[in-house]
Amino acid sequence: MRARLIHGLLPQTRHARARRERRGFGRHYLSVAWSSFRTFPFARVLPPHPQFRHLWTLAVLCSLFPTQISTGIGSTQRFGSSRKRTTMAAENLRKRLQEEVTCCICLDFFTDPVTLECEHSFCSTCIAQCRGESSSSALCPLCKRAIRATKSKPNKQLSNFAEIAKQLRDQEKEEAEGRRFCGRHGEPLKLFCKDDQVPICVVCDWSKEHKGHEVVPKEEAAQEYRDHVCSLLEVMRKQREEILVHILNTEKESQDLLKRIESEREKMTAGVKQLYHIIKKQLGFIVAQMEWAKKEIMTKRDEQMAKLSQDLSSLGSSIQEMEQTSRLPVSDFLQDVAGTLQRSKEVKFKNVATFPPKLKWKTWEFWDVTAILQKFTEKFKGNLISGYSLRKAKVSLNPATAHPRLVVSEDLRSLALAERPQALPLSAGRFERWPCAQCRESFSSGRSYWEVEVRNEGAWALGISKPLVAVRKGAQPSPEAGVWAIGRWEGQYRAVVPPHYPFLYPSREPQRIRVALNLEAQQVAFFDAEAASLLHTFSLAESSSDTFCPSFWIWKKSHLQLCL
């Protein structure tokens, strides 16, 4: 059958010409052509044709029958004759062949196909119906290009392909029909062996091969496996939906993270530019004052130097005059000795300060400002180094501050509510009204964080407070009273800001809360530690000089655990 199909498909051509044209096919097509030529001498090698850009579909024919494919250099590869050895690639090629020979109008195999100017092919009757009354011109149903009826040509080779595809389809139906009978006994396959998971006939059921196996009617087995497949499909569909949702969430989360980074980058750049402009402005002001002081110093110096030069010249003249007078004879010298002495008294140097104290104090101001700038630079550099470093704080509870109703564990890491107040020693730092407790550690600078495990039952709050907070004696917890905290009570997450206590809306039930204290920026932030999502932020700008302690409040059945 294979030989007849290929012989009817391939046109007659000379062998020498075929050898020249085979070079353009590629190794796979060349193998198919050589296989046909060596197995069936009366077949002719396939020539390249411009209308067949998908001639590789002929490989389907070779995969359905026993064949030897020659590589053209003497080696031969043997393919098995059993259909069980038909690969998935051949199955895909078979489907592709059917697609290539299917008319897109009637959705069936081509019947008397014609090829238009645009190289699209259709059944002759289908394209005639599309043209309708206009027999001269129409539009291609695929590319919508104008086509002329006179340019349409019958495609005999495509018709042969369609005929081959029809025969393959019929052959598949015959093979499927044959699979309904037992290959060994020829009886209908009415039973199904669950142990071997294969259909069997009645005779197979009595054979030793299936003795003791669980055998059921094939309809019952099919229904059972269909139900199982349906349940698996349902699970897989749900997983597919979950994956799609996860893809969307991942994309959205990535965009949010990228936007957050871009926003912070813009803020940081703007802050650095603003700082640069401030420093540049102040530097310009200081430099201008220095330039003025330099000019004043140079002016005073020039004035003083001119005066000193004048005094020096006058004094030189007086010295020369007196030297000449002292060398006169006695009678001449004593003639005007009184005038000479008087003139010497008049020549007296007055040592006046060249630079006034105000100008000198200005230079000391520059010295003082320079010292301030040096300290500021060192502090700013230190803040940048320490400020960028986020430190995980090791905190522990302080039993001396815990309310009598609170039970502190021996390792000082967990806090629970007792049924009744405990007999505890008096302490000046113990909370008296509210069931609260503080930690031993306190913070006054840098960036630190700690995490707390919480439960979704009872009521609790956590945050920071001042060491000597007024809440200890009964004041209402609030930022004004020195408490910055969030909590959960009555099934809702809230910020501890009376009187309204704003609601918080986490995307999930937090199991672990991170408290991030940034005293360089004077803020405290609360996060869902596992989801890395922000819950709330407080500003501490009014308390920049204070120290802060981790603090906790619990009610009812709540329980808090400090994380290591």
Image (tube, rainbow, N blue to C red):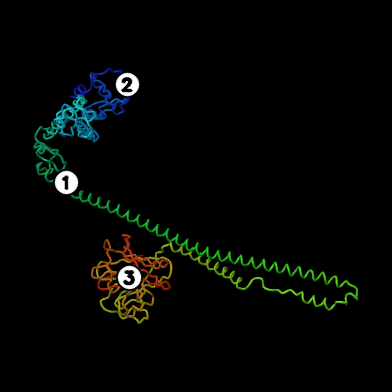
Residue 91 higher or lower than 340, as above or below: above
Q: Nearer the viewer, mark 1 or mark 3?
A: 3
Q: Residue furthest toward the bottom?
A: 426
Query: What residue sits right under mark 3 in the picture?
Result: 485
Closer to the camera, 253 or 56? 253
Identify the mark at residue 229; answer none if there is no mark.
Answer: 1
Closer to the camera, 287 or 350? 350
Left or right placement of residue 435 versus residue 135 in this view: right
Q: Does dot 1 land on a helix, a strand or a loop?
A: helix
Residue 229 higher or lower than 147, as above or below: below
User: In the rendered structure, which amino acid carries the disc numbered 2?
Assistant: Arg
Closer to the camera, 320 or 531? 320
Residue 118 locus on image (x, y percent)? 24, 30
Q: Does dot 3 land on a helix, a strand or a loop?
A: strand
How far apart marks 1 and 3 lie (CA) works out to: 53 Å
Residue 249 locus on image (x, y percent)? 28, 54
At x 58% / y 66%, what residue is drawn? 292
At x 37% / y 67%, what residue is drawn? 524
User: In the rendered structure, which amino acid carries the disc numbered 3?
Assistant: Ala
Residue 119 locus on image (x, y percent)? 24, 29
Query: What residue sits right under mark 2 in the picture?
Result: 20
Asked if residue 18 can be seen in this view, the reply is yes
